[in-house]
Image: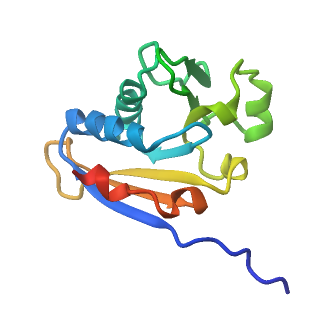
């Protein structure tokens, strides 16, 4: 039997977000940690705040175009307004074949030069990179306002081993 593939321990942060405004702010803070080639996987039920988080990310990265849910286009490219990376926002919900299908989308952008945010990507895009940031958004238990979210960020691989996720909790 082969030895298990060595992976750096995951770098994890749990954070409570109390409003959509705070979710956007978390996205803006997260943008400061991101760099070209980063893969961010967003998981959460409908209405959990994935698009709100991504919108904040887009603002933080200073990209063009309003970030909306890419459900019907599968992927949307937001080119940078300045010197930063493009933001590629992917909805993998209807991507059956994973990345091969993503390659077929012909995104007119170089993925290594972009920040890629994938909604509903679990089980579909992991092979894209050993280094990825997994963001899971859960509705807080017992929250009657339907505003509070528990966000768990898990940085996988060498890229995230030393990333300062704690700075996001500021």
Total labels: the figure holds 0
Q: Is residue 89 visible?
A: yes
Instruction: Farthest residue to the right: give it.
Output: 1
The quadrant in which residue 89 appears is top right
Left or right: residue 38 compared with residue 61: right
What residue is rendered at 53% in x and 44% in y? 40
Where residue 44 sits: x, y (%)?
43, 46
Taking 96 as reference, is 67 above or below it? above
- Residue at left offset 29%, top offset 33%: 24
Q: In the drawing, does residue 97 fall left or right of residue 38?
A: right
Q: Is residue 157 visible?
A: no
Query: Looking at the image, which residue is at 61% across and 55% down?
Result: 131
Q: Is residue 139 left or right of residue 77?
A: left
The quarter of the image holding the N terminus is bottom right
The correct choice, above or below, for 110 with respect to 96 in the image is above
Indicate how the structure is coloured in the image: rainbow
| As drawn, 117 above or below 169 | above
Q: Position of residue 33 (x, y in %)?
A: 43, 44
Relative image position of residue 166 (x, y in whole percent): 31, 58
Q: Residue furthest left?
A: 144
Name the residue nearer the viewer: 91 or 78: 78
Residue 73 in the image, given as x and y percentages of width and height: 60, 19
Residue depicted at 23% across the width and 58% down the height: 141
| Outermost residue, front side | 83
């Amino acid at each position: 039997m082969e030895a298990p593939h060595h992976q750096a321990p995951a770098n994890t942060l749990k954070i409570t977000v109390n409003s959509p405004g705070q979710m956007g702010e978390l996205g803006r803070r997260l943008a400061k940690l991101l760099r070209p080639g980063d893969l961010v996987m967003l998981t959460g039920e409908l209405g959990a705040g994935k698009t709100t988080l991504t919108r904040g990310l887009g603002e933080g990265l200073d990209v063009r175009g309003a970030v909306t849910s890419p459900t019907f286009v599968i992927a949307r490219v937001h080119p940078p307004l300045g010197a930063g990376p493009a933001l590629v926002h992917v909805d993998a919900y209807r991507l059956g074949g994973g990345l091969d299908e993503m390659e077929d989308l012909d995104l007119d952008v170089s993925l290594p030069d972009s920040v890629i945010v994938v909604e509903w990507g679990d089980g579909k895009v992991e092979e894209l990179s050993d280094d990825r940031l997994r963001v899971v958004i859960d509705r807080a238990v017992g929250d009657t306002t339907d505003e509070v979210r528990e966000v768990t960020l898990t940085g996988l691989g060498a890229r995230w081993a030393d990333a300062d996720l704690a700075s996001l909790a500021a």
